[in-house]
Image (spheres, helix red, strand yellow):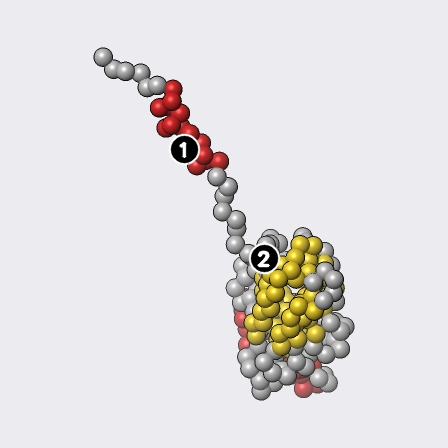
Amino acid sequence: MKKCLSMWKLSAVIAPSIIALSLPVAVKADQTLTFEGFASDTVLTTQYAGIDFNGAQILTAGVSLNIPAFPPHSGTNVIYNPSGAMSLTFSTPISYFSGYVTYNMGMTIQAYDSANNLLGTVDGSATANYVGSGGPPPNELLTITEPDITTVVLTGGTGNNFTLDDVMFPGSVNLNAPDASPTWLLLGAGLAGLALVNAGSRKFASLSPRA
């Protein structure tokens, strides 16, 4: 004669399954802010949740970005500093900030806490790294790691001096964006040639992010 499974035995079988089902899903890894999906010349302010941009504007390869001197690290969009420094203020403190920069007058990233105390500074490796500058390759990865960062300030020149692409920080969430592969290459050699011709006819065109 078969014995009925007692309630305590049954609960011992079911309980672990319930616990397993109720465990939280692993937190998604930090996403890269590619700046794709925005129209050229869009001024960034609060489009990304939890971040307040100041002094940041979209440039697009084939529209407003100086190609090939300032190539995007991925996709076709970057942000640049139309006037002076660029800053990002975070609603929740972060512990690191990284991004790819191309610049023409040096590059400095400073991190501050909520009391405006300077936490740390990281500098670019040269005075310029745009294509043709004679410096290191473009899109230099700069990372600053400090506890309780609430504001990051990027400085390099008085305006139209650097581009920033593919930003990451704890909890970063990218907006809906197309493929982040370096699609600016698809613009072809013709566009690169046109940029070089324009550089010869426009003062300092080869030195600035905006075409």
Q: Closer to the observer: label 2 or label 1? A: 1
Q: Residue 100: image x %, image y %?
A: 59, 70
Residue 195 or residue 180, whichever sits in front: 180
Quadrant, the C terminus: bottom right
Q: Residue 149: image x %, image y %?
A: 66, 62
Quadrant, the N terminus: top left
Question: Viewed as shown, does residue 125 lie left or right of 83?
Answer: left
- Residue underneath mark 1: 16
- Residue underneath mark 2: 170
Q: Which mark is residue 180?
A: none
Residue occupying image coordinates x 62% and y 77%: 123
Amino acid bearing label 2: Pro
Residue occupying image coordinates x 62% and y 74%: 122
Amino acid bearing label 1: Pro
| Circle 1: element type | helix
Q: Residue 138: image x %, image y %?
A: 57, 77
| Circle 2: element type | loop
- The local crowd at label 2, few if under 14, some if 14 to 19, many if 20 or more residues have their Cα within 10 Å, is some
Query: In terms of image quadrants, where is residue 156?
Result: bottom right
Spatial separation of the CA atoms under disc 2 and disc 1: 32 Å
Report whether residue 47 is seen. no
Does residue 207 sit above or below 91 in this rendering?
Answer: below
Q: Earlier in the sequence, mark 2 or mark 1?
A: 1
Q: Residue furthest top?
A: 1
Residue 38 or residue 33, whichever sits in front: 33
Does residue 166 sit above or below 4 in this rendering?
Answer: below
